[in-house]
Image (spheres, rainbow, N blue to C red):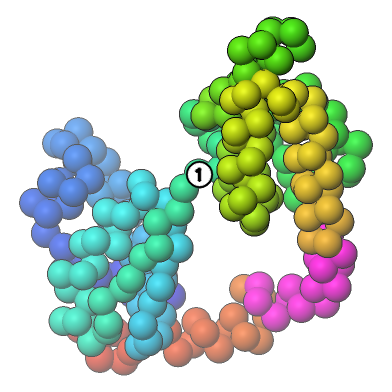
Amino acid sequence: KIYEMAIPVSKKVTFSTARAVFGFTESSKIGIIFFPAIQAAPTFFEKKRCLIPAAIDQDPYWRIQTDFAESLGYYKPAAIHGKFFPPLTGLTGKMSASMPETAIYLTDEPEVVRRKIWKFALTGGQATVEEQREKGGNPDKCVVFKWLEMFFEPDDEKLVQRYEDCRAGRLLCGECKNYLIEKVQAFLREHQERRKQAEPLVKKVKYTGKLAREMWERSIPEELKEGS
């Protein structure tokens, strides 16, 4: 069904546009040239307003859709740009399934969480406790603070206080790591419990389920099938 929808989408995007947006060259394979149409197809499953959560690097796929969505009889899509959660090992790059030290997995046990954060989480602290007390740390270079800021500390006042205490040397890296460990462990306990409760519902949304089959069956309008 994705392919059936990708065909009318592909007819709306010229190679000139695709080359300008995605940087294709004469050596680009035809498979990768067609891929933007495949990527765009699921947003046209239903004639409803589509909101796409994606990282900023995916934006070109949705941006070109605004030029032709209405000509296919659909609304222009809207997008929410997400930021990458930084890996434990530094503020650049991203978590990777092939590098367990970079990430906390949703299935990790409490002790695994503790070990990973203590061993791999990069901080902006000094080499010794004495230096930390004297010179202070740098939360702007600290993954632990960044994780708290982005996800695990909803109280902005507490974040500001933690930032200032780090700068002033009143807060040590070990204290911050322990605080983050508690936050992550609490989050995972709740998530893992909810995951167990959701297991009976999984089949409903998988491609083998009734709900998925109904979605595929109604996804491609007849007029677009005829025009393909």
Is disc 1 placed on a helix, strand or loop? loop
Percent coordinates x, y for residue 200 in the rendering: 82, 77
Q: Image height check: is 141 above or below 4? A: above
Percent coordinates x, y for residue 138 in the rendering: 57, 23
Q: Is residue 135 left or right of residue 140?
A: right
Q: Main secondary structure of the magenta part?
A: helix
Q: Image height check: is 93 above or below 70? A: above
Q: Is residue 170 left or right of residue 159?
A: right
Q: Is residue 11 magenta?
A: no
Q: Is residue 198 magenta?
A: yes
Residue 103 sits in which quadrant?
top right
Residue 27 sits in which quadrant?
top left
For the residue pair 30 and 108, the one nearer the viewer reads as 108
Q: Which residues are magenta?
A: 192-206
Q: Kindly tell me whether residue 228 is visible in this rendering.
A: no
For the residue pair 9 and 74, the one nearer the viewer reads as 74
Percent coordinates x, y for residue 82 in the rendering: 45, 53
Percent coordinates x, y for residue 162 in the rendering: 66, 38
Q: Residue at x 60, y 35 (%)?
A: 163
Q: Is residue 200 left or right of residue 31?
A: right
Residue 161 sits in which quadrant?
top right
Crowdedness near tag 1: few (<14), some (14–19) or many (≥20) residues, C-alpha within 10 Å: some
For the residue pair 46 and 92, the one nearer the viewer reads as 92
